[in-house]
């Protein structure tokens, strides 16, 4: 069953013996180094191989429907080959197939689902209401978000496991019961682990994390979604997507010197902005593709989320072959190579020659220089050569307070070896990092291989701190031990993908500048934000002037990847129906869910504007991470952080809401007060509302507290879908200037909304605003509701609708 829920029920699914697998000691020193998977671990080759015969057959059907001469992009080939009914999807509302992009509602059948531990909790709580014995498609859970980064992996990992035992036990027991592969804490970050084990050319997968497109580096269509969308695939219901437009990015030339794949996407983000990719798939192509490593391609696809793209992907490349073979998947490489070398009409893994892109950008890799993006937004892109001027003109801090490399975006073997090269250069000159320097391996495979090749000891000997194989500081799980206090303005340099205000350490004055691992490493040694490693020098302890040489590093390990600690390998994907899943009725971490009420049989009346937001309002703003991650499985508790990062349009205050009588409180407190009084409400916001992560809590929490409508200038794709799934109506201003006509505490009614819902999305919606003085303002709005989405909202949520369909 999919979709929305739900208020909390404290009744429990009981078990006397929670499933808990013994863990090996969580120290890097005790990790077992082995050169092949443990004998007891045999990956399911069939479930990890895309269903190529089925996809090729479906591609043939697509060719029949659209005509064999129709030239298709790579993204279209893979997407359309996963359609539940190609003829219906491609010919309905598309001028008989002539205008598919941006018009067709694609109903797709993904091959696989991946979930990280924070979002998996709510996804599984929803899936459990379906009463199915197992998932309909292969799935995996990755415990990476709930592990703190502070003093190093040896200390942080066991403490995080202990502190989150209840949640990890729940996830592991659910995984065992329903046949989901479970990667335990310490195994690695979801996106790196997926790249190493599940991603494959031609695959289509959904992931409950916005950076799921990382798998596009290996030629997959991988899309970040909320938990309710993931449940669609888990129960074998078609997953709906408005057919994206295709943005072609042609790569020419070859990277050299300090330039890296990270710089390609940092520069592209500056061109497109955080909204420029909305409604598009980014498809890389051109002669420059073959010069990039597979993991470099993954870095670029990962950060496509920062420009709002549905996903990003690369065509099949010889680099894919070498990466698949190095990660023990030669069987996939051989099949993919055969398909990629076939004639274009049967070639699933490359675009047809002459395929049309809706927009196209050309990037010359040969002339690209390193870029630094930030602070506070990933699209503020500055070339390194002029960054020192930007520091001075913007009065940014001159001192680097911390350098952090790794994360899902830049934790590959190649990334770490290039950073190591710089560390070795500096160490040979007698230099140590001038600031705290943290290193996060992306997976146990990466960590163990780096350990074998002495890369980790190089970092540690230089004074670096190696954190657990987890997200850590990138998603706010960072306990700083320096002298930076909340409110202190400071600059950090990271190789991460996102840099919203307060995201990493909870301090809204921490400026996170995004760069490649190489630039972050160099900045950590210089200790100053105005340093340019291409031209500037550092004075060594002996008084000499030291300048870095351009970094080098192997793309793949010469002696293959190590598996590492065998206790970090996943559980079997075979279901165990007798396994009991535990949710204690007294838990403050987990709570079962109850259905939301259905939509009334009339338009909405008597809504009040809870809050009018000004400026950027990300999913971090709506549902903060960091210490709140522990409540991801408990909707009532996590709802206490709803919109606490939002700025008041009238006063500029953050998390200060005004009631009708002028009294003030926090936003979630006022929402709860109104809910208790039976008052439903809406939020008014500006552009790209819900930008950032895929966290569906940013939709669930407002719904739980009585939110009915979000009225914004525009929405981020994933969040807009999540709102609909949970029964919240997303409306946009037909005229953006009308944002000025509505204020907090105004009373609002809708006109035409109920008719739109009953007609399956046909018609227009107006919002009637009653001001405090009794006057009324009518505001025209737009919507993107499909027929299915109207059904979700009428039923109260997508999950409610699925439950109703199942009963009938």
Image (cartoon, rainbow, N blue to C red):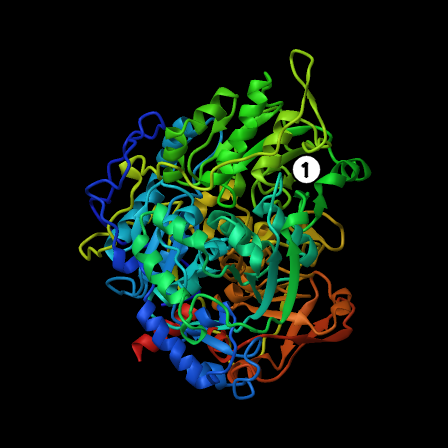
Image quadrant in which the C terminus is located: bottom left
Residue 279 showing in the rendered view: no
* Residue 41, horizontal then vertical, whole percent: 22, 45
Q: Residue at x 46, y 81 (%)?
A: 89
- In the image, 283 versus 79, the foreground residue is 283
Q: Which residue is mark 1?
A: 509
Farthest left residue?
Answer: 578
Q: Is residue 720 above or below residue 379?
A: below
* Residue 175, horizontal then vertical, whole percent: 29, 52
Position of 19 with respect to 308 (left or right) is left
Image quadrant in which the N terminus is located: bottom left
For disc 1, the neighbor class at 10 Å (few under 14, some 14 to 19, many from 20) is some
Q: Is residue 227 above or below residue 552?
A: below
* Residue 727, horizontal then vertical, whole percent: 50, 69
Farthest bottom residue?
Answer: 96
Total numbered labels placed on residues in the image: 1
Q: Is residue 760 above or below residue 618?
A: below
Position of 794 with respect to 385 (left or right) is left
Residue 110 showing in the rendered view: yes
Position of 549 with respect to 79 (left or right) is right
Q: Residue at x 19, y 41 (%)?
A: 39
Q: Secondary structure at mark 1?
A: loop
- In the image, 741 versus 63, the foreground residue is 63
Q: Residue at x 49, y 80 (%)?
A: 787
Q: Residue at x 22, y 56 (%)?
A: 574
* Residue 273, horizontal then vertical, whole percent: 68, 56
**Which of the 4 quarters of the picture holds residue 2?**
bottom left
């Amino acid at each position: 069953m999919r979709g929305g829920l739900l208020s909390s029920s404290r009744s429990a699914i009981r078990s006397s013996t929670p499933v808990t697998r013994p863990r090996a000691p969580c120290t890097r020193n005790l990790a077992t180094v082995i050169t092949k998977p443990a004998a007891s671990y045999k990956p399911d080759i069939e479930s990890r191989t895309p269903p190529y015969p089925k996809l090729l057959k479906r591609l043939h059907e697509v060719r029949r429907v659209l005509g064999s001469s129709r030239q298709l992009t790579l993204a279209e080939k893979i997407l359309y080959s996963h359609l539940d009914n190609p003829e219906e999807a491609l010919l309905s509302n598309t001028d008989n197939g002539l205008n598919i992009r941006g018009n067709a509602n694609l109903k797709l059948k993904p091959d696989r689902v991946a979930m990280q531990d924070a979002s998996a909790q709510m996804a599984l709580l929803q899936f459990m209401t379906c009463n199915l014995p197992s998932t309909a498609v292969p799935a995996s859970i990755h415990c990476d978000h709930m592990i703190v980064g502070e003093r190093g992996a040896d200390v942080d990992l066991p403490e995080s496991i202990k502190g989150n035992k209840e949640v990890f036990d729940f996830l592991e027991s659910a995984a065992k019961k329903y046949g989901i592969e479970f990667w335990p804490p310490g195994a690695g970050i979801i996106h790196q682990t997926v790249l190493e084990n599940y991603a494959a050319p031609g695959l289509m997968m959904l992931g409950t994390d916005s950076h799921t497109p990382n798998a596009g580096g290996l030629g997959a269509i991988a899309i970040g979604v909320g938990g309710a969308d993931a449940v669609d695939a888990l129960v074998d219901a078609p997953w709906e997507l408005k057919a994206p437009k295709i943005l072609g990015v042609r790569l020419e030339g070859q990277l050299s010197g300090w330039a890296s794949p990270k710089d390609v996407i940092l520069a592209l983000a500056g061109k497109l902005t955080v909204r420029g990719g909305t409604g598009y798939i980014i498809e890389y192509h051109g002669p420059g593709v073959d010069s990039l490593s597979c993991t470099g391609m993954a870095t670029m696809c990962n950060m496509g989320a920062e420009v709002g793209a549905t996903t990003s992907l690369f065509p099949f490349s010889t680099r894919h072959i070498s990466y698949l073979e190095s990660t023990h998947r030669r069987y996939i490489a051989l099949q993919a190579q055969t398909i990629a070398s076939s004639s274009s009409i049967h070639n699933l893994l490359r675009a047809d020659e002459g395929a049309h892109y809706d927009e196209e950008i050309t990037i010359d890799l040969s002339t690209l220089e390193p870029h630094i993006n930030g602070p506070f937004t990933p699209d503020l892109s500055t070339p390194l050569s002029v960054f020192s001027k930007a520091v001075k003109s913007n009065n940014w801090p001159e001192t680097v307070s911390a350098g952090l490399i790794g994360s899902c975006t830049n934790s590959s073997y190649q990334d770490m070896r290039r950073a190591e090269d710089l560390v070795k250069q500096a160490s040979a000159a007698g230099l140590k990092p001038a600031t705290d320097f943290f290193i996060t391996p992306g997976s146990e495979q990466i960590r163990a291989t780096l350990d074998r090749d002495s890369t980790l000891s190089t970092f540690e000997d230089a004074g670096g701190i190696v954190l657990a194989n987890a997200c850590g500081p990138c998603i706010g799980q960072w306990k700083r031990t320096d002298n930076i206090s909340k409110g202190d303005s400071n600059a950090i340099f990271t190789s991460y993908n996102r840099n919203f205000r307060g995201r990493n350490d909870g301090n809204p004055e921490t400026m996170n500048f995004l760069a490649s691992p190489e630039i972050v490493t160099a900045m950590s040694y210089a200790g100053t934000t105005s340093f340019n490693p291409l031209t500037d020098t550092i004075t060594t302890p002996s008084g000499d002037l030291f300048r870095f040489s351009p970094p080098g590093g192997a793309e793949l390990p010469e002696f293959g990847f190590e598996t590492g600690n065998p206790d970090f390998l996943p559980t079997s994907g075979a279901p165990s129906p007798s396994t009991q899943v535990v949710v204690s009725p007294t838990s403050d971490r987990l709570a079962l869910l109850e259905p939301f009420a259905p939509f009334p049989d009339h338009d909405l009346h008597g809504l009040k504007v809870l809050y009018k937001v000004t400026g950027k309002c990300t999913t971090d703003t709506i549902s903060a991470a960091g210490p709140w991650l522990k409540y991801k499985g408990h909707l009532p508790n996590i709802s206490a952080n709803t919109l606490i990062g939002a700025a008041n349009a009238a006063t500029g205050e953050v998390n200060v809401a005004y009631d009708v009588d002028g009294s003030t409180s926090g936003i979630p407190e006022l929402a709860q007060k109104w809910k208790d009084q039976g008052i439903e409400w809406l939020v008014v916001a500006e552009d790209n509302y819900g930008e950032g992560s895929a966290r569906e809590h940013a939709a669930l929490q407002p719904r739980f507290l009585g939110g009915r409508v979000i009225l914004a200038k525009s929405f981020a794709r994933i969040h807009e879908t999540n709102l609909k799934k949970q029964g919240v109506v997303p409306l946009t201003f037909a005229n953006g200037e009308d944002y000025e006509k509505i204020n907090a505490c105004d009373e609002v009614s809708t006109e035409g909304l109920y008719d739109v819902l009953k007609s399956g999305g046909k018609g227009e919606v107006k919002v009637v605003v009653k001001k405090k003085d009794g006057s009324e303002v009518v505001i025209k709005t737009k919507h993107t509701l499909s027929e299915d989405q109207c059904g979700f909202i009428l039923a109260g949520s997508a999950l409610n609708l699925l439950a109703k369909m199942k009963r009938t």
